[in-house]
Amino acid sequence: MINKERLINTFMEYVKIDSETKNEKAISERIINDLKNLGYEPYTDESGKKLNSNGNNVYCFIPGTNQSEAMLFSAHMDTVTPGNGIVPYIDGDYIKSKGDTILGGDDKAGITAIIEALRTIKENNLPHRPIEIVFTICEEGGVNGVKEVEFSKLTAKKGIVLDSGGSPSQIIIEAPGQTRIFADIIGKPSHAGASPEKGVSAIMVAAEAVTNMNLLRIDSETTANIGTFKAIGATNIVSPLVEIVAEARSRSTEKLKSQTDHMIKCLQDACDKYGAKLEYNIEYCYFSYVLDTEDEHIKQIESVCEKLGLEVEKIPSGGGSDANVFNLNGIKAVNVGAGMELAHTTDEQLNINDFINASKFVFELMTI
């Protein structure tokens, strides 16, 4: 019953609306308008003020017409960069972007799949469960928007987050927690030609610290990476400051702490060795979760996938999502695929068949 042409057209319209993180106002206004045109009453919170964004989280509560329990459906409105001036086009079985931008399927594919399911229900006057919709801001870069969600207004204890690649039958049952490290290594400036021995090179200290770190793939559950290594100065001055931004991720809480502590120790040891000073801050972005594969919610998702002829895969993820925070707040949220491929790159594309199945999947869960 999903209108495939309308689904694709809506997606193409959504991705043309610029919405890099902290610039979600325009896309939120379009989504609110689309929900109002369906006769619903969406509203927003004031999360943007706390996160320095011009947008806010969007909510829509739709009373059920049957006795099924309420379910949450969620996706995020922001995109990574470069996400302005996107020009989408269809290339065979895929939607791609022209030029040097991302496509924005992460996560406008998820949003569109939910909107189309609601349109199909409305135009056919179909019975449905109580539906709770949350579209978040500032997901990219730390899942910050969902942390400001008004959880006291949500009644659903089960949810679906459409923010993963592949088919909706690819069910994320495990996702990592993440920490970010913001570190300043403070050296001692001195003339690099006349008296270098009187200085302490922050660059040299930082380079040794990073060299001593275990990075990238640590084990099957754990990764770590340096994102920023910044030092700007004249060549005739011993470098006085290096700024480092790093991250660690793990599906094990213990391993996440251990990896984070290891990275801090490498920084501190190098500073102690050369007489530099370390100032740092650790941000706990989100925490890991593991879902029971035999849980009733997972079983219902499996049955919907089987009805749609989709082969179920229960897989762990290397990335976090809003589902991490929903689970932390008592909502058993499962992240599933919405057709995105090569997300966060300018080669990003959307598998049209998986995208259509994602909307069918949402529709089935809403009307089950």
Image (cartoon, rainbow, N blue to C red):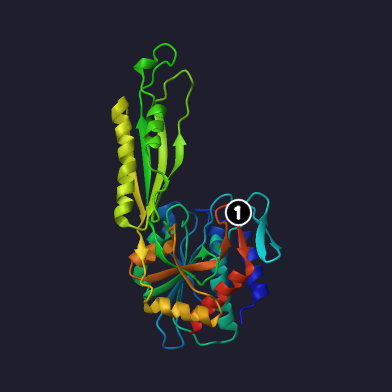
**Is residue 6 positioned above or below 223 on the image?**
below
The quadrant of the rendering that contains the N terminus is bottom right
- Toward the viewer: 283 or 205? 205
347 over 271 or under it: above or below: below
Residue 261 in the image: above or below residue 56: above
Q: Residue at x 30, y 27 (%)?
A: 273
x and y, in percent, of residue 42 in the image: 49, 71
Q: Quadrant of residue 102?
A: bottom right
| Number of dots carrying numbers | 1
* 335 sits left or right of 150 in the view: right
Q: Can I make out residue 98 in this image?
A: yes
Give the secondary structure at mark 1. Answer: loop
Residue 38 seen anywhere in this rendered image of the structure: no
Residue most toward the front? 219
Q: Amino acid at mark 1?
A: Ile
Residue at the image position 51 percent from the left and 53 percent from the top? 21
- Residue 250 vs residue 352, the one in the foreground: 250
Question: Where in the figure is residue 247, as x and y percent of width and height?
Answer: 40, 47
Residue 4 horizontal side relative to residue 260, left or right: right
Please, is residue 259 above or below residue 34 in the view? above
Q: Nearer the viewer, residue 164 or 34?
A: 164
**Residue highlighted by disc 1:** 102
Give the quadrant of residue 325.
bottom left
Judge by depth and name the residue closer to the eye, 100 or 175.
Answer: 175
Q: Tag 1: Cα neighbours inside 10 Å, few (<14), some, or many (≥20)?
A: many
Q: Residue at x 46, y 40 (%)?
A: 228
The x and y percentages for residue 48 are 44, 56
Residue 163 point in image, percent of width and height: 50, 64
